[in-house]
Amino acid sequence: MDWDNLRYFLELARSGTLAGAARRTGVEHTTVARRIQSLEKQMGAPLFAREAGGHRLTEAGRQLLPAAESMESAVLSVEQAAPTAGGGPSGVVRVGATEGFGTLILAPHLARLTQQHPNLTIDLLALPRMLHLSRREADIVISLERPTRGSVIVTRLADYTLHLYGQREYLARRPLVATRADLRHHAFVSYVDDLLFTKELQFLDALHQPERFAFRSTSITAQYEAVRAGAGLAVLPAFLADRDPVLVRVLPQEARFTRTFWMSMPAEAKHLARTQAVWTLLKDTAALEKRRLCPECPAALNVGTV
């Protein structure tokens, strides 16, 4: 049985769409469709039911899935044992992270890692949504909630703090904020409630119920730019806002929040040289950037091991 066909089968089963499987395998969606058709012809039965929202496994597909996953594990073991040309990690590692953390903190360090290892390619998915290891959307995922399902390795990567911020000129022309009650005089910038991908980003419920929002976005960098433009107050990561002289913390003692980044990867990928190299780099980055991520945290960093 052709392993390539099974590889496309697995990616389609996990992503649920031809476009998703194509992105993951780096081919056109027509290639995925052709491979699936070839496998279905070989199996003598349809493996997917075509629906408006994508592709769903049929009974034959569900029966094939465990065998395909076993073959995938065997291929990963062979890759692990094979010597790498050039002596360093090679291949593609896809890292999923939250938008602000991925863009501002991780990107420069990951880019330098690829300079050290020319055969290594890193895909950084810095997105305002949850990524799933079970669907193979990424090889390593950094999330705000600790994964509790699946055969995964999880470590506490880093804590980070957030504060309430406002633009200096905006605050100068609006009523003084000395207590929480004074927040009623101000407009707010925040996330779009029904598109919030994790409860860990719900801050204002514990601080103040705004009468209105001046600006909302799924993007933390868009919120940051809106606050810089004087649209209102927002809870922003310290690593994003503290560096900006235009912004100032509001109620710094009361309006402070701490969240945790959790890092996870599939257990079967633990010993792959490329995954291990990126995993180690991410842990080292968290340690190096600790003061920027969490200015109020104690000096010792609580980072797990693999």
Image (tube, helix red, strand yellow):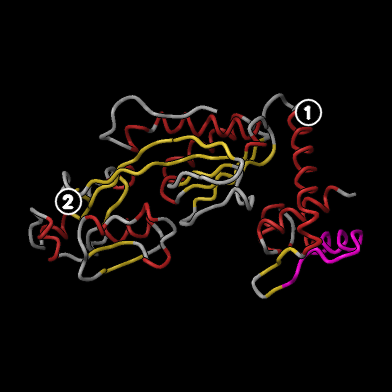
Q: Residue furthest bottom?
A: 52
Q: Which mark is residue 82?
A: 1
Magenta part of the chain: 33-50
Mark 2 or 1, nearer chain start:
1
Q: Which mark is residue 114?
A: none
Q: Residue at x 49, y 34 (%)?
A: 155
Q: Residue at x 17, y 45 (%)?
A: 252
Given residues 10 and 226, the one toward you in this image is 10
Q: Quadrant of the C terminus?
A: top right
Image spot of residue 61 (x, y percent): 78, 60
> Dot 2: few (<14), some (14–19), or many (≥20) neighbours within 10 Å?
many
> Dot 1: few (<14), some (14–19), or many (≥20) neighbours within 10 Å?
few
Q: Is residue 128 left or right of residue 73?
A: left
Image spot of residue 96 (x, y percent): 53, 47
- The image quarter containing residue 206 is bottom left
Q: Residue at x 79, y 37 (%)?
A: 74
Image spot of residue 31 (x, y percent): 79, 60
Say which residue label 2 marks: 250
- The image quarter containing residue 157 is top left
Name the kind of residue labelled 2 in the image. Val
Image spot of residue 37 (x, y percent): 85, 64
Quick check: is 47 in the magenta stretch? yes
CA distance for labels 2 and 1: 55 Å
Q: Residue at x 45, y 32 (%)?
A: 285
Given residues 4 and 123, the one toward you in this image is 4
Q: Is residue 125 left or right of residue 57?
A: left
Q: Please tell me whether the stretch drawn in magenta is mainly helix, strand or loop.
A: helix
Name the kind of residue labelled 1 in the image. Ala
**Local SS, label 1:** loop
